[in-house]
Image: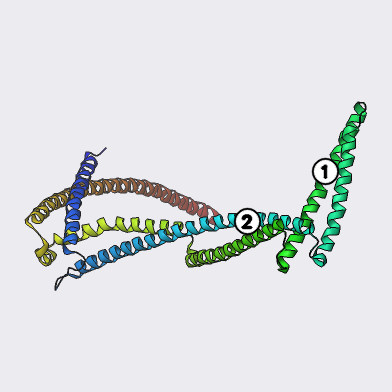
């Protein structure tokens, strides 16, 4: 293996190390200069490259600031959205509970009203249903009692239990139907807004149902307002997704922008090392900065020396490669010449054979002409 290639690798490794050292110095200087110049700093007759770097930096800083504000707003919206969801769920749960309480209150009211003799036109149809169901319940309970008292063997006992289960199921069904009758009577009385009953139990049930109904109306209005606010928030988000997704997108963008800053610092630091730009930045450069530029210049000189050495070694290798190629071509030419000489010799032999054949033809032709 050519040792010069190893030399090139070592030189390139040294060049990378010096380039990294130079870039760190210039990047740090560029960051310091941007901080000193600030958001509003500018100077007359500034090279366009510096103006471009400052404009790009300030644009990126503004985008980060705008994104940070947007994130704050989205976080507030996210918190409010969670509060609205919790509030709606809480009020809907309360509404569900109160609806059950309202049904129970109407059931108590209906039962109390049917026990009275007032509101005849209103209560008669419900009272007929009540009496029919009460009679049916009494009949089913009597039948169940008789089944429980019946005695017999194992088979009779099994049959009794089956009949008893059916009988109890019918009792529960009839009682459930009776509760529905009471509920229907109470809800109709409540909806009709009839005069308050004089019976204390019925009056208490009616007033309780009224309080619950008012609370349910208030809850329904509150839930409607809360859902309207929630809908407005989600409409604002639109196709851009939830606040969490938008926050994540903005945070990724901010991280990407921050990754752009080191490149800008390096560009400004590199410009500060150039005479035409250094003069424009002179008012922002300190003695320590000039020392940094000197060290960066030292690394730059080593880099350039290394590049020249690499160029020379590569040129040396290229010359040797070209020489080797020339030798290879010369050998190919010599080989071809040998082949040509051999071909010429073979051609001469063939031509001699032709001459001999032509002589023989002349001899044979003479024989043919003799008489």
Q: Which residue is mark 2?
A: 98
Q: Decide if residue 71 is in sight here.
A: yes
Q: Position of residue 366 (x, y in %)?
A: 50, 54
Quarter of the image with the N terminus is: top left
Question: How far apart are the two marked residues, 1 and 2, measured between alpha carbons?
Answer: 29 Å
Is 13 drawn above or below residue 278 in the view shown? above
Q: Residue furthest top?
A: 153
The reply, left or right, for residue 322 in relation to residue 99 is left
Q: Position of residue 308 (x, y in %)?
A: 16, 51
Residue found at x 22% / y 44%: 13
Quarter of the image with the C terminus is: bottom right
Q: Nearer the viewer, residue 199 or 224?
A: 199
Q: Position of residue 325 (x, y in %)?
A: 28, 48
The reply, left or right, for residue 38 in relation to residue 131 is left
Judge the density around disc 2: few (<14), some (14-19), many (≥20) Cα neighbours within 10 Å. some
**Numbered circle sitting on residue 203:** none
Q: Nearer the viewer, residue 100 or 273?
A: 100
**Based on the displayed image, in which of its 4 quarters is residue 272 positioned?**
bottom left
Residue found at x 87% / y 54%: 132
The reply, left or right, for residue 200 in relation to residue 149 is left
Q: Nearer the viewer, residue 151 or 5?
A: 151
Q: Nearer the viewer, residue 284 or 189?
A: 189
Residue found at x 55% / y 64%: 222
Please tell me whether mark 2 sits on a helix, a strand or a loop: helix
Q: Which residue is mark 1?
A: 169
Q: Position of residue 121 (x, y in %)?
A: 82, 67
**Based on the displayed image, in which of its 4 quarters is residue 162 positioned?**
top right
Name the mark nearer the viewer: 1 or 2.
Answer: 2
Is 90 drawn above or below residue 227 in the view shown? above
Please tell me whether mark 1 sits on a helix, a strand or a loop: helix
Judge the density around disc 1: few (<14), some (14-19), many (≥20) Cα neighbours within 10 Å. few
């Amino acid at each position: 293996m050519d040792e010069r290639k190893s030399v090139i690798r070592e030189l390139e490794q040294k060049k990378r190390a010096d380039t990294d050292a130079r870039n760190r110095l210039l990047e740090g200087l560029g960051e310091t200069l941007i901080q000193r110049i600030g958001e509003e700093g500018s100077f007359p007759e500034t090279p366009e490259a510096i103006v471009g770097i400052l404009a790009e930096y300030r644009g990126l800083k503004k985008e980060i600031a705008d994104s940070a504000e947007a994130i704050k707003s989205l976080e507030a919206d996210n918190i409010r959205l969670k509060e609205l969801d919790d509030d709606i769920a809480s009020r809907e749960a309360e509404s569900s509970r109160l609806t059950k309480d309202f049904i129970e209150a109407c059931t108590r009211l209906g039962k109390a009203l049917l026990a009275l003799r007032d509101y005849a036109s209103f209560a008669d149809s419900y009272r007929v249903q009540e009496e029919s169901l009460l009679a049916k319940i009494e009949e089913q309970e009597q039948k169940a009692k008789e089944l429980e008292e019946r005695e017999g063997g194992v088979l009779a006992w099994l049959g009794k239990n089956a009949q008893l289960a059916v009988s109890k199921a019918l009792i529960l069904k009839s009682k459930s139907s009776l509760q529905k009758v009471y509920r229907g009577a109470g809800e109709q009385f409540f909806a009709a807004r009839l005069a308050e009953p004089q019976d204390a139990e019925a009056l208490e049930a009616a007033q309780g149902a009224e309080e619950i109904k008012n609370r349910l109306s208030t809850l329904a209005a509150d839930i409607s307002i809360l859902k309207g606010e929630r809908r407005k928030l989600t409409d604002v988000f639109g196709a851009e997704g939830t606040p969490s997704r938008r926050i994540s997108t903005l945070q990724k963008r901010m991280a990407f922008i921050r990754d752009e800053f080191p490149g800008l610092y390096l560009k400004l630091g590199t410009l500060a090392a150039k005479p035409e730009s250094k003069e424009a930045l002179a008012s922002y450069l300190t003695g320590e900065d000039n020392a940094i530029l000197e060290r960066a210049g030292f690394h730059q000189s080593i880099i350039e020396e290394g590049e020249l050495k690499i160029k020379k070694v590569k040129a040396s290798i290229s010359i040797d490669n070209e020489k080797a190629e020339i030798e290879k071509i010369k050998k190919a030419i010599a080989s071809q010449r040998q082949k040509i000489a051999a071909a010429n010799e073979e051609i001469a032999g063939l031509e001699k054979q032709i001459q001999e054949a032509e002589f023989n033809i002349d001899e044979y032709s003479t024989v043919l002409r003799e008489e």
